[in-house]
Image (cartoon, rainbow, N blue to C red):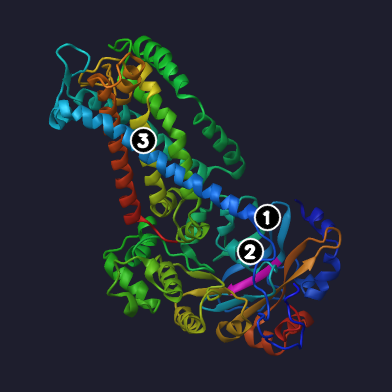
Amino acid sequence: MSTLTPVGGPAIQPGRPAVSLMSTRPRHGETLVRLVLRAAAILTILITIGILVALLVPSIEFFRTVSVADFLFGDRWAPRFADASFGVLPLISATLWTSGIALLVAIPLGLGAAIFLSEYALPGVRKVLKPILEILAGIPTVVFGLFALQFVQATVLREWFALDTGAFSVLAAGLVMGVMIVPTIASISEDAMSAVPLGMRQGSAALGANRMQTTVRVVFPAALSGIIAAIVLGVSRAVGETMIVAIAAGGQARMVTGPLEQGQTMTGFIANAALGDSRVGSLEYDTLFAVGLLLFLVTLLFNFISIRFVRRFREIY
Amino acid sequence: MTSDSRSASYSTNAEIKPALHVTPQHGHRGGLLPELPKPILECSDVNVYYSDFRAVTGVDLVFGQNEITAMIGPSGCGKSTLLRSLNRMNDLIVGARVEGSVTFQSEDIYAKEVDAIEVRRRIGMVFQKPNPFPKSIYDNIAYGPRVIGMKASNMDDLVEEALTRAALWGEVKDKLKQSAFGLSGGQQQRLCIARTIAVKPDVILMDEPCSSLDPIATSKIEDLMFELREDYTIVIVTHNMQQAARVADRTAFFTALASEDTGDRTGVLVEFDKTQKIFESPSDQRTEDYISGRFG
């Protein structure tokens, strides 16, 4: 402060600035915080790149032996047999069945719950229901897996409905996976719908629209980008979900042609094979990574589609 | 809450009522109110509550057909709340309830068998902030007729007619398929008026329709109100006294009174008369103080 010129004094003294704008004391804490935060951000990116590299290297090794066409379009998956075959279609078929069934359950239930919470429930009811719904998202998936195997498959499908199905089925796994995804879709959609300004609902009501018309024709389109994001996140979770399908869908990689059949999904294969005794560097070991890479690319594709979709339909209000 | 407990909690009522010149008419609807040629909407001893809080107390008011009635007063005087109770918009607010009677063409709009949706179809509303739907200009107008299942032989004609009446057709006729969000604030507000006209209501309630607009857009909306008066009854809440003086045939002045026991403020009607009378020779001192800018 000593460099400050007194009021009314000469504006500029020779060889000395009129005022000092330099920091009077060093701020080490701030610098440290900034460095730590930057390191955290960079580390996240590095880890992602690291995972990609870790997937790519063994995958490239794999594709030196097996052609990409044989892998993607082959319909026999038998990596451990003497007469080995690496057609991934059976795994994809099981993944499609479980994910498809899961979404058939999760989208209507999730959106229904979101609409109820956002448009119909009284504030008190919402305050109680939403946390309960989110607890559902906190149940470990292995518990869902057991529930799918012991209750849904064994009791509901086989005993109550007397369906012609074995110990495992893609139906049981898909149904339970759907229930698991409901909170994700409901919670994000509800946030998107609640964010729609009240004025829009009032405008609709003032024209003589009832609540359902307002919800379906005004709130829903206004919240569409958020709702699409919720559904895509649901799809990603369904495709990537491992424990439920590993426990309840089955372990034999055969083409799945109906919901009551068992089947091994991409994730189910990785979970099972990774626990086995594949020697590092063996073809069987590399197979794991090739399937992992495929899974990664599928999820990435979904995310890209959703970003395009959200941009295109974004509503500004 | 019974009327006894009401007057108990607002012990000032006894003193207020004479000051308000409403005592003689209490219970006789319209006693001191001007005789309107064609009343279309009437409030009789209306109280509006938000849960336990009484926002509006004991309002008697009558709105004439094909007239513009302005409701003015300081913030918190309950004018917007009263406006929203005229077409049951308050139903959308949890805990809001209305006591007393509001009649539209002599029908009690709060009667049990009355459908709030039908009420709002007859008594439309334009809001403070323009609230177009996230749809095209065309679909914004067509929305109302569609949701109420209006038999329109030609929706295109209906849209054109509504936009023309709202003095917006010339500006938007080449971009009907574009999003309504691309319009300016003033255009959006006229779009909202056009949207309201499209369902052919009898009354249009306007809640500070120009408060977010610039003076040019405001003057367009005011011109529009004169046009619309030919076919519609308009009730406008405004903070802008000049606006009330310019557009309204009649003006109702509201103020807020604090309860002696609880300190809660509640809105009451002070004076209701021809606009010229209110602005030139009001009968109540408080009206005069407000008009001349001494308070509020």
Please name the amino acid that badge 3 sits on.
Ile
Give the mark count.
3
Residue B62 colored in magenta in the image: yes
Magenta residues (range) = B59-63
Does B144 appear above or below B226? above
Q: Do the CB atoms of the residues marked 1 and 3 lie less than 8 Å apart?
A: no
Please name the amino acid that badge 2 sits on.
Thr
Q: Do the CB atoms of the residues marked 1 and 2 lie less than 8 Å apart?
A: yes
Residues at discs 2 and 3 both on one chain:
no
Task: Tell me the tag on residue B81.
Answer: 2
Viewer-nearest residue: B141 or B57: B141
Q: Chain of mark 2?
A: B
Give the spatial CA distance, label 2 vs label 3: 59 Å
Element type at mark 3: helix
Residues at discs 1 and 2 both on one chain:
yes
Q: Which residue corresponds to mark 3? A: A51
Q: Residue furthest toward the front? A: A15
